[in-house]
Image (cartoon, rainbow, N blue to C red):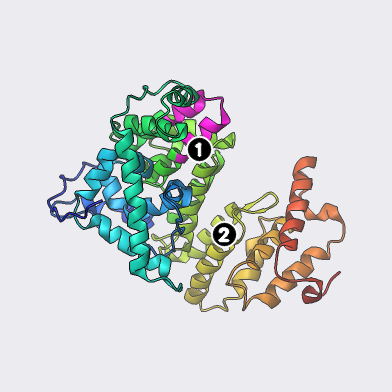
Amino acid sequence: MQNSNVSGKNSSPRSVVDNGLADARQFGEFLFDENRSLRDGYQAPINTANAVPAICETEEDFFGLESRMAINRILRDYLEKSVLTPTELLHGHRELQRLDDRGALLPAAVSQLARLQTKGREQAPKEREEELYSFVDRIVLRTRRADPARLPRLSKRFSETLAAVSAVGHDDPEYLAMVVLSRELAGIRNWIGKLDRLCELAANETDAKAVLLLDTVIADVLGANVIQELIGWKRSLGDAIISMLDLADGTFDVEESCAKETVSALNKLMADEKLPASRHVLISRALSQLRSSSPLFRADPAKEKEEYQRVLARLLVIGGIISGAQVADAIASRGDRIAEVDGADTRSNVSDDSHERSASAARREARYSSSFQTRQIDGHLEDIVDQLDDVFRERVVGELYRRTMSLKDQMVSVTGAYTKLQKTRFNKKNIGWA
């Protein structure tokens, strides 16, 4: 793929309808980012990524979830302007050509990836750049071969599309089916429209493999600047985080949304556990906000700790804590900042009894066990052990769950707590109980 130096102005800004959504800046840059690429005189910039993206060893790795999430972050401004998902970009020859025509955009993205992926490794950034370019060239070649192919139109059921492209024999059926899907989605010029089409296909589908393929693209859309329209106006970042977690579980209140039909369809698919990749993206975005420095309640700093406790209560679920160690790390990061503001000892955030009023003993144990799997625990060992002592003084198993739980949920809660404990890096000798 050649690296051209074509430059030019972006198209004029899209109009933003005032539909009661909260000020984008209220919630921080990652969740509701102002689309800088849409302003006159700007070329779509590269967004700085702090986390190291998954290291791709082959061109196939570029199609994986973590790689597409990285593409969504780094090329966010360009993808927003073009209203494209990473899937559409990776399966469309014309879309890749347009990206290449943006001059320094692609080289800047490759350079940043190479720098991040070689940090702390023996490989030189320049060598990694060459590897990445070779992968990109193979992806481009694959799209070029598929571009003139006479592929069937998208069927009402995606499984029928998969079956139809199998007869083409030009490439892997899954790849060709995604080419067909990407061609249709590229013609839909707004995120809600893409989501509606994808949810319609997923709802009509009975083949599990086809649903999982659709899930990968729904996850891409949920990584775009669409969240605020889905969850509607929120009084605080804490509310927004809780709403994203509700949507990930399929329990979000549809009446709060600015896209009720879309959210209703998403809720159903999420509740039926058909969209694991999409759920992962929503939770990751929620945790990114929890980990960020943006206030949880900008309008009233005095409510920051209260809002933090509300988010904590939502993160605790039957059998443990959402996303385990990843959440514990985000909790610790936010808790440390709140402690600094309060002038309190950071360790008090781990053992503060006010955080436990909404959790059963088993959920508390799972939370503390998760903390042992993060880099944040060094100064908290004594406090966490004290809390575990409190939990396991409740020798009767019946005290480890709420009496109102069903028998199934009781078992899930207790076994979840036990599993979390077994996976941590401490033993009976550390804790002092047997």
Question: Residue 370 placed where, x, y %?
Answer: 65, 63
Badge nearest the viewer, 2 or 1: 2
Q: Nearer the viewer, residue 233 or 54?
A: 54
| Above or below, 238 relative to 335 | above
**Label 2 vs 1, first from the N-terminus:** 1
| Above or below, 119 relative to 95 | below
Q: Is residue 232 visible?
A: no
User: Does 209 appear in magenta?
Assistant: yes
The span shown in magenta is 198-216
Task: Residue at 36% x, 57% y: name it.
Answer: 132
**What's the CA distance linking mark 2 and mark 1?**
23 Å
Count all numbered tags in the image, as a single digit.
2
Question: Residue 135 placed where, x, y %?
Answer: 37, 52
Picture quadrant of residue 425: bottom right
The numbered dot on residue 253 is: 1
Secondary structure under badge 2? helix
| Above or below, 93 relative to 30 | above
Task: Residue at 25% x, 39% y: name it.
Answer: 94
Question: Residue 416 placed where, x, y %?
Answer: 73, 53
- Dot 1 amino acid type: Asp
For the view shown, which residue lies furthest in the front direction?
169
Residue matched to label 2: 327
Residue 212 relative to residue 20: left or right: right
